[in-house]
Image (cartoon, helix red, strand yellow):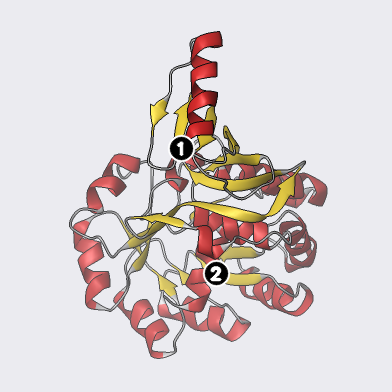
Amino acid sequence: MDAILAKIGSIGLVPVIKLDSADKAPGLGRALVAGGLPVAEITFRTKAAADSIRALRAEVPGLLVGAGTVLNLAQARSALEAGASFIVSPGFDEAVVDFCLERGLPVLPGVTGPDGIMRGLAKGLEVLKFFPAEAAGGLPLVEALAGPFPAVSFVPTGGIDAKNLGAWARRPNVLAIGGSFMAPGALIEAEDWPGIEALCREALLALHGFSFAHVGINGSDEAECGLAVTLLSTLFGIAGREGASSVMCEGIEVTKRPFPGAHGHLAIRCNDVERAVARLEGLGVKALGETAKTEKGRIKAVYLDRELLGFSIHLLRA
């Protein structure tokens, strides 16, 4: 996958921005970065789009800037000249797609079904915009499209906000999610940068869906594990579910051998482990790759390089 698209996927959210004045672009860009979303799709719905892209590229280091609502070749040229790192279109314009491909510029044309997807595949595109996401069929359609098009992933936009984005984030064929809810026009107009930063943080939490899954207690061997499980059952009526390396007793996992962590581990559930790992690495926490468990090509669980009061931490895909 193209490095820029891979970065978008690791971030997981793409703020879609409409700017009436390029003067507001630097403040907005800094708010996005501070809120943990170093990416912006500046829409060509206003005359300020190209100048806004230039301002962001010049004044907000580390921000990935793309152009959205690109409807024709002239706008694609303008976006490229302004410094856009990627192009997004609400529909499939072959001239725009060819222009971008000829210049090595990542392009996400909008599709709503098999016809558009097949046109994209014919051009060598495996990441496409899905728009308007909710109105076009929502999650059921995206799930259905995974069958005939297993190599294709989408960036859905339209009708998605902090309340429903978690369900979209759990789909393996959703690369990232776009929307204006992270930087609404009213807050941009008021230059309420702290408000936008807060919305970005809120959206990130909704994207990852972090929640407590279970606590793991290290047993030294199968015998010690069996004694612990028997005690939980005798005293509290908590039944155990046997596994290859542990026994799950509701929210308590008793292991049959020592696992990472002096006392055990805390399992934190998330919508997508790879995306969560990318986010946590930005906060200085790394995943221990040798502990990763995969399922159908995706990480199901992995330990982190941090402990909390003698308990290791591992992520678990929801």
Q: Residue at x 32, y 56 (%)?
A: 296
Q: Position of residue 288 (x, y in %)?
A: 59, 61
Q: Position of residue 253 (x, y in %)?
A: 52, 32
> In front of the other: label 2 or label 1?
1
Which residue carries the number 2 mark?
Answer: 7
Which residue carries the number 1 mark?
Answer: 246
Task: Give SS at disc 1.
Answer: strand
Relative to 75, 242 lies left or right: left
What amino acid type is highlighted by mark number 2? Lys
Whole-angstrom CA distance, mark 2 to mark 1, is: 36 Å
Instruction: Please tell me whether residue 79 is drawn above or below residue 156 in the rendered image.
Output: below
Residue 37 seen = no
Whichever of labels 2 and 1 marks the residue nearer the N terminus, that label is 2
Q: How many C-alpha atoms fall within 10 Å of the one at disc 1: few (<14), some, or many (≥20)? A: many
Q: Nearer the viewer, residue 303 or 174?
A: 303
Q: Nearer the viewer, residue 195 or 260?
A: 260
Instruction: Please tell me whether residue 304 is drawn above or below residue 223 in the rendered image.
Output: below
Q: Residue at x 24, y 55 (%)?
A: 113
Q: Nearer the viewer, residue 282 or 86?
A: 282
Q: Nearer the viewer, residue 127 or 261?
A: 261
